[in-house]
Amino acid sequence: MDDDPLTIAERWLGEGRKVALATVVDTWGSAPRPVGSHLVIDGDGAFEGSVSGGCVEGAVVAEALEIADGAPAKLLEFGVADETAWEVGLSCGGTIRVLVEPIVAGGGAAR
């Protein structure tokens, strides 16, 4: 089976699941994953892929659950200077910005 997050998102949509996609859109300094990395999340909290090597996935998944359920897209930022970064484990010394958006069947990202 293909483990590409975008292929998984397409499959999950075909199964009737609610789906959100998280994408690294910007990095600064030392970042665990490059721009363009994806994490796909379904409405039940299942996820595939990575936007941070594991250190902020929990926070991203929590936001994605709301977004998959109809909340608007959101740009998240995690950095070593943020208290949030230490809480979720981002201690690599950089900053990452992650766009989390709902994905709808037949239409790509809903904005």
Image: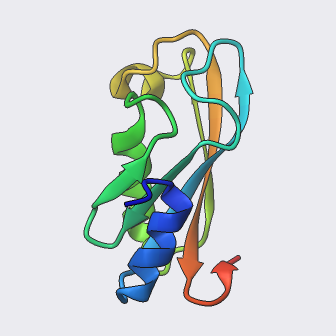
Asked if one can make out residue 80 in the rendered structure from this viewpoint, the answer is: yes
Q: Nearer the viewer, residue 107 or 98?
A: 107
Asked if one can make out residue 67 in the rendered structure from this viewpoint, the answer is: no
Q: Position of residue 49 (x, y in %)?
A: 44, 47
Q: Nearer the viewer, residue 76 or 44?
A: 44
Quadrant housing the N terminus: bottom left
The colour style of the image is rainbow
Image vertical order of residue 106 relative to residue 2, above or below = below
Which residue is drawn at the image coordinates 62% and 90% (left, top)?
106
Numbered label tally: 0
Which residue is drawn at the image coordinates 61% and 59% (left, top)?
74
Point out the residue furthest to the front here.
Answer: 1
Q: Position of residue 110 (x, y in %)?
A: 66, 79
Side of 87 relative to 77 (left or right): left
Q: Position of residue 14 (x, y in %)?
A: 43, 87
Which residue is drawn at the image coordinates 71% and 28% (left, top)?
27
Which residue is drawn at the image coordinates 51% and 11% (left, top)?
92
Q: Where is residue 16 in the image (x, y as percent from the top left)?
A: 37, 89
Examine the image and state in which quarter residue 54 appears. top left
Examine the image and state in which quarter residue 18 appears. bottom left
Q: Which of 27 and 53 is in front in this view?
A: 53
Image vertical order of residue 22 relative to residue 102, above or below = above
Quadrant housing the C terminus: bottom right
Image vertical order of residue 5 relative to residue 65, above or below = above
Q: Nearer the viewer, residue 74 or 46?
A: 46
Side of 88 relative to 24 (left or right): left
